Image (cartoon, rainbow, N blue to C red):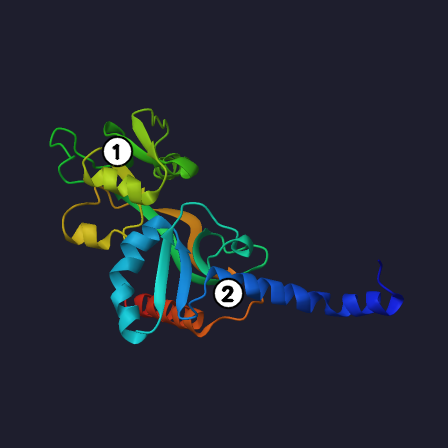
Amino acid sequence: MELTSPGVRYLSAIRSALDDIDEATRKLQASPNAGAVNICVAPAFLTHWLVPRVISFQQQYPDVELRLTASVNQIDLRYSDMDMAIFYGDGNWPGIQSHFLREVKISPLCSPKLLHDLKPINSAEDLLQYPLIHISKRDKEWKNLLTNNGVKRVDTRKSMTFSSTSLAMGAAMEGLGIALADPDLAQRELEYGQLVKPLDIYLDTKRSFYLAYQEGIPLTKSMEAFRDWILEEMKKENTNP
């Protein structure tokens, strides 16, 4: 069997509509609860920024269920059951609608119990007296920070590596070394004295956090609620640092 000429023309005209129906059906099957939003979040952002503020969202939108998943990898939203994501990067992803949340500038952080009176940290070079904690896919950050602050010979052999910022910060809190992280994301740990900044220097990563979802898709009311809430929260923080 084969289509007649009118059938071929008809199929060409409705193909995009059929594709939209197929995608909408797949989304509905993956997330049958229209009041829920599946969101994939970078672990450090999830643990240190989003989770402490979830109660604010729940108070404003008690009928919306947030289903939060942590992932260090950037998922493909076209083939995932995730509705939205918070990505770390430059904001340029094909087929993705992205909303800027906040830029990321990192600084050395460590447990106060790590620091030794006989090894004071008064300059960037002094950081090399201690173990340096790296993040596997961002292994140039320590070298860039030290080089930018006048260290000519960078030796990071005395170090360890973790897969995410959250794990690196956890290791730093245990006194295993000095990690690089965004002090704003570590605000609670700094306030509680679990972490300190041994030196007031920063590295601009040239990357930021973005709220992301598929370009051109209709947002559910729950997705709109989360988008509007998180953008408003970020606006408040930028207005009142």
Residue density around tag 2, few if under 14, some if 14–19, many if 20 or more, within 10 Å: few
Q: Earlier in the sequence, mark 1 or mark 2?
A: 2
Q: Looking at the image, is 8 positioned above or below residue 172?
A: below
Visible residue check, residue 184:
no
Residue 20 position within the rendered picture, expressed as x and y whole percent measured from the top left? 63, 66
Residue receiving disc 1 = 127
Residue 115 position within the rendered picture, expressed as x and y whole percent measured from the top left? 15, 35
Residue receiving disc 2 = 28
Residue 18 position within the rendered picture, expressed as x and y whole percent measured from the top left? 67, 66
Foreground pick, 16 / 162: 16
In this picture, residue 71 sits left or right of residue 198? right
Foreground pick, 21 / 117: 21
Visible residue check, residue 228:
yes
Residue density around tag 1, few if under 14, some if 14–19, many if 20 or more, within 10 Å: some
- Image quadrant in which you'd find residue 179: top left
Label 1 – label 2 distance at C-alpha: 52 Å
